[in-house]
Image (cartoon, coloured by chain):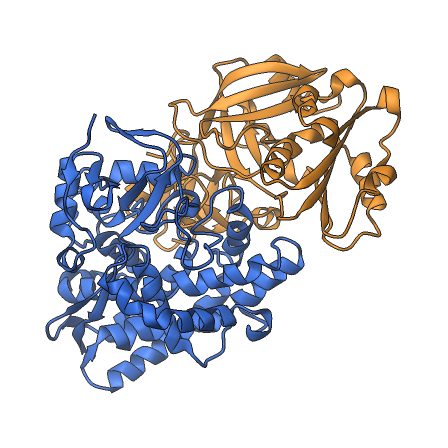
Chain colours: A blue, B orange
Amino acid sequence: MKPPISYADPFDHDNLEDPGPLHASLRGAGPVVHLSRYDTYALARYEQVHAALTDWQRFQSAAGVGLSNFRYEKPWRPPSLLLEADPPQHDAPRRVLSAIIGPRALHRLRDQWATVADDLVDRVLSGGDVVDAVPALAEAFPLRVFPDAVGIPAEGRENLLPYGDHLFNAFGPPNDLVVAGAPRIADLSAWVNAQCARDVLSPDGFGAAIWAAADRGDLTSEQAPLVVRSLLSAGVDTTVHGLSAVLYAFATNPEQWQRLRKQPSLARVAFDEAVRWESPVQTFFRTATTDVTVGETVIPDGAKILMFLGAANRDPRRWENPDSFDLCRDPSGHVGFGMGIHQCVGQHIARLEAESVLTALARRVPHIELAGPVHRHHNNTLRAWRSIPVRLHRK
Amino acid sequence: MAETRTLRVTGKEPVADGVVALTLADPHGARLPDWTPGAHIDLILPGGLVRQYSLCGDRWDAYTYRIAVLRETNGRGGSAYIHDGLDIGEAVGLGGPRNNFPVVPAGRYLFIAGGIGITPLLPMIAQVDLLGADWQLLYGGRREASLAFGRDLAGYGDRVHLRPEDRYGLLDLTGFLTAWQPGTRVYSCGPVPLLAAVERACADLPPHTLRMERFTASMLTGPARSAPFEIELARSKTVLTVPAGSSVLDVLAAAGADVLSSCRQGVCGTCEITVLSGEPDHRDSVLDDTERAAGTCMFACVSRSRSDRLVVDL
């Protein structure tokens, strides 16, 4: 059966500014929709997105998780060994990295990051009540703790955000956002690649641990720098916008902030609820490895399939009152980190960062509210923020 | 909802003298947790016997697991039960899959199997062959008829060296290892005396060349329980009962404890909780043997308890 057709462009500025109406119409149209503009298939309901994410056998990543189909087009950079690989090539990089940044391995960072968060919040509060939460907190914290944890030098870290921004834009079509990033990308890529070399990385970080895995033969020495690159590519912008999302959620849902203050152990639930609610990573593509039947539609072998994580995370078939940010909800099972073998390997880092910042803020700030108009940052893949002015009421 | 994870036996057939292969599937036809070559699962048999078996099927088939079980004449009852008592249609408990024996990337591999030790190597061989790596297998057993999957392996031609002991004597490890060159990884699984001999034969090779799997006594832990148990939340002093058919996660969620989860398969590690006392019955794919033995944490989506009560830091 032919699927319903949508003529929409999910990557145009109206939809990037507010994807909600498009998501609702795609979910309503059926389990699978043909996006005529890009001759690709869209999944927007939770059930189908979840199923496709876990089915790496039929929905492959190795042909690229952006619109570009690596079966026919050359990728703009050497493919990621994690994101853009399937078993068996995916196994060793994933195994090595998940051991290095798994929940058990992060325990040693917990106290350290709590101290950094306390210090950051103290400094932010000493600068006045009204701050822009995006640069002051959501960018400042990850940019302080994460590159240190990876072990890259202090110099040049300002390149991380523009690199990630372009990388996530490049998963979409070659539109104005990609064109705008293109002039700088050669330099940014060269800088990022240079940080992945063994002698650049400090001896105690995640990067050095990746190289140590190569010494043990768990990876090849050609793979090690690419695995370090995965950390630097996927670990910064995503967390920044995840933190922005949770801060925005609290600034606009004051009763939820009071709930968190009463019960700070909810910090992790709050972050995951924000990841469900805003889905910092909105979309990823897969490619059909064979003719795949979804609903009553046959998606042909080789077709690109766009999974709307953000739409699935607000699918009323799965979530009650999906548009509300609610700490009473159990957000477990959201697909904001993906699901299956490609599920975000850094999710535990993101949760620890968020927990650190939220705990430090909740201790000091009885009320948080918007202090001016907010501004989105448009990106082809990320639900991103440019500015969230907030008033932080001190004790 | 997550339940205690069970598998149903959907196939059972002899594959060599004293070796039976089982095909296992989800009772409701769902996908099974993903695995990588070298992985094993725990089978939790009636009465709480827990036995580890390597997965030897096709990972591209998401709906069935395949294992092969040797009847251990001096065993403690697990393999005899599987051979004689476990019928098609029956259910067994599942732990894992876990992989302590992963395939590392390399251009060349030498595989050495003894008897039932072929099982973890089968999917490894399929995989490195798919990747176009150069490899050879030396496979020994008592008699030709005791070499499981010998016919499947014959399809690989002269990469495979089948060496039943009644015709060839003990495996010529030294001769086989002359094929070693820098960068070659050696993978071996089989009876303890074979592994010891392989270790000696590889003693002069560079570190990290040899990878072996030993199912040691420490992995053969005491009986798992399917009975209900209590879970005490230390911070609130609440005591909850986890019934046989429910997961710890579900019981905690119903009681309003804020434990996040994600995969519900014991894979992602999101639902970790700290265990203060009691003995967790680990059924996850995350912890290594040392961490499992320490018993200081557990994953609430799949793991249970061996003791009557678990006290957790919630």
Q: Determine the image quadrant of residue B212.
A: top right
Total labels drawn: 0
Q: Which of B27 and A94 is in front in this view?
A: A94
**In the displayed structure, does residue B17 sit left or right of residue A72?**
right
The residue closer to the viewer here, A293 or A190, is A190
In this rendering, does residue A354 appear at all? no
With A376 as the anchor, is B210 left or right in this view?
Answer: right
Q: Indicate the position of residue A166 as horizontal and vertical percent values.
A: 33, 65
- B156 relative to A42, above or below: above
Residue pictured at 52% horizontal, 41% vertical = B282
Left or right? Give the position of B228 relative to A362.
Answer: right
Quarter of the image where one finds residue A380: bottom left
Residue placed furthest toward the bottom: A127
Q: Residue shown at 43%/25% (left/top)?
A: B26
Q: In this view, does A327 lie above or below A126?
A: above
Q: Which residue is drawn at 56% across and 69% down?
A: A197
Q: Nearer the viewer, residue B266 or B227?
A: B266
Vertical comparison of A136 with A350: above or below = below
Q: Where is residue B234 in the image (x, y as percent from the top left)?
A: 40, 53
Could you say where residue A100 lies in the image, as x and y percent from the top left? 53, 58
